[in-house]
């Protein structure tokens, strides 16, 4: 009878420990998910900014190219 009582008490303690551990793991997982989502959001924002900068560069290069081409044609026509 005494052995069963000790086993039951030990079993209850193990069950509480398990539940506490599970609760801590769930909280930690939620924290990691939140940090991950914040990092993803930050990287997405950085990518958007880089795409905007890249597009401005492409537009500038295109404009410069057209100016150089126009000036080259005008210079060529000037000589003839």
Image (tube, rainbow, N blue to C red):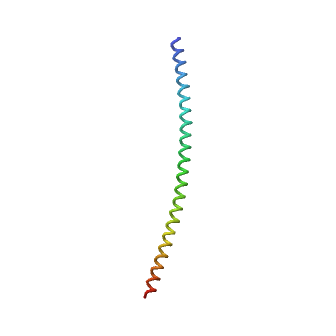
Image quadrant where one finds the C terminus: bottom left
Residue at 46% of width from left, 77% of height from top? Answer: 69
Furthest toward the bottom, the residue is 80
Q: Nearer the viewer, residue 57 or 27?
A: 57
The residue drawn where x is 51% and y is 17% is 7
Q: Is residue 62 above or below residue 54?
A: below
Furthest toward the top, the residue is 1
Residue in the image at 52% along x and 52% along y: 43
Residue 14 lies, with reference to residue 79, above or below; the image says: above
Q: How many labels were placed on the picture?
A: 0
Q: Residue at x 53, y 30 (%)?
A: 21
On the image, the x and y values in percent for residue 39 come to 53, 48
> In the rendering, at what x and y percent does residue 10 appear?
52, 19
Specify the quadrant of the image occupied by residue 31: top right
Along the line of sight, the residue nearer the viewer: 13 or 46: 46
Q: Give x and y (percent) for residue 57.
A: 50, 65
As drawn, 59 above or below 13 = below
Residue that sits furthest to the front in the current view: 79
């Amino acid at each position: 009878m005494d052995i069963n009582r000790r086993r039951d008490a030990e079993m209850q303690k193990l069950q509480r420990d398990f539940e506490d551990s599970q609760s801590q793991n769930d909280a930690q997982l939620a924290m990691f998910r939140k940090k991950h989502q914040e990092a993803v959001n930050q990287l997405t924002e950085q990518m958007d900014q880089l795409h905007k900068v890249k597009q401005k560069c492409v537009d500038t290069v295109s404009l410069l190219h057209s100016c150089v081409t126009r000036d080259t044609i005008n210079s060529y026509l000037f000589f003839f």
